[in-house]
Image (spheres, helix red, strand yellow):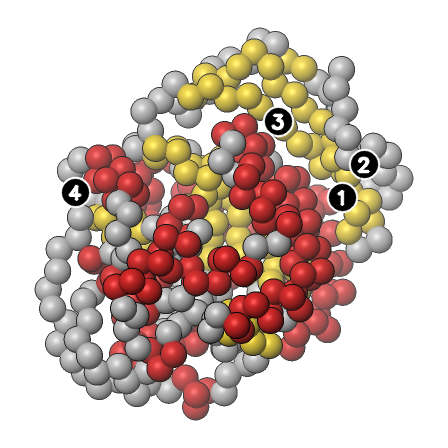
Amino acid sequence: MWRSPFLQHSSKKAPALLASTAIVNRNTPPSTSGHTRSPLRIYNDLDAIRGGHTISYKICAEAVVAKTDKISFNWIEVHLASHCNIRCNGCTHHSPFAKKRFYDIDQYQKDISALSKVADVNLLWLLGGEPLLHPRISDFFEKSKEIGFSKLNAISTNGLLLNKMGDRFFDNIDYIFVALYPSFEKNRGRLKDLLVSKSRLRNFTFNIISRSHFYQIDTDGNRRLSDEEAQKSYENCDRPKKGQFIEDGHFYKCMRPVSTGEYLRNRGYVEEIPDFRVVDGVDIHQPLLKERIESYMASKKCLESCYYCTLGLKKESKVTVWRRIKATFDGVTMFQNIVYRSRSMLYWTHAIQDVFDSLYSRRIAGKIQDIGVSLVPHRLLEKEECMSREKHQPVPAAKSL
């Protein structure tokens, strides 16, 4: 019998959520996802204290032996909406400058159906803009489960619309990450009460994490970086390694190719630029998808959109002790399978990361400023600041990989 080294006390406030502990099943049947389970599957309780309530979650640690030729991804991100219900200065997804646009559910179904034939995905992250703006958000989770696209479904949100989500939404979610900005800290208590109440009735976990600063990763004056600068930023960036992204029939190493072109045109950029949405991605619906994705992921050349992004330039100064530890374990398959397939471990990794980031925030901010990547206090933009300055330029034709 095995018990987690984490909190071992039982919950008196939420006894209904207590799961059976230390169940060892030595006759686990093969998985239908293309993996063969090892003879050992271990379940254990993990208690999380939130908002004055002690809630117990069941964590499953599995040894997984790959018996498939699929490409493995810790997570895949999907932007359900390009726009947002608030305008944050420094938004890395350029949402304040994006036109209103939703991911079509039929296109999404086609995309994940094709991708699921060549990829094995632990975690599906639904993002935005603000994903809760999508009128059919629950359909995305249900389609993912129907197709068997991922092991877990997660969402990242500012939380302003969570109180409007129905039971169907909460029934299909595994993990909710709420980024709480200073202007909305007053909502923390109500959000906690809502999510604690919902999580007691449904099997999901959540984090509410304060976000007081944003990295300004767009190049100064939207200038184009030199070849050397862009390549350095790409090589130091974590996104191409673990931030894969799909939208409208294309697979990307990160989210920037989708929004950079529209952002530059909105800001009045007059130089000729390629269609990043095409040249920086892989067409999901063309033949030899697995081979093309493998070649694309193995390429060490920076993307065209990297010439307008400094995200990788902050890495050398941003790493905290926790991020060093996590970066080390991120390369271990068993660690990935535990973290990105477990609701509870998603909670703990984000909670611990937030503590370390808070402890080191002042020192980090000084170093970031020194290398020219600004870390600025969160600020809501005025509508006038986001108005388009676009000067229409012809976009050259391009072919995707």
Question: Which callout, 2 or 4, points at the residue further toward the start of the chain?
Answer: 2
Q: In this rendering, does residue 281 appear at all?
A: yes
Q: Position of residue 19 (x, y in %)?
A: 74, 29
Q: Which residue is mark 4?
A: 286
What amino acid is at disc 4?
Gln
Residue 140 visible? The answer is no
The reply to whether callout 3 and callout 1 are in contact (CB within 8 Å) is no
Along the polypeptide, which appears first: circle 2 or circle 3?
A: 2
Check disc 2 and report its element: helix, strand or loop: loop
Which kind of residue does numbered mark 2 sit on? Leu
Q: Residue at x 30, y 33 (%)?
A: 118
**Residue that badge 1 annotates:** 48
The residue where tag 3 is placed is: 61
- In primary-sequence order, the first of circles 3 and 4 is 3
In the displayed structure, would residue 153 be above or below residue 227? above
Q: Residue at x 42, y 55 (%)?
A: 237
Amino acid at dot 3:
Ala
Q: Position of residue 319 (x, y in %)?
A: 57, 55
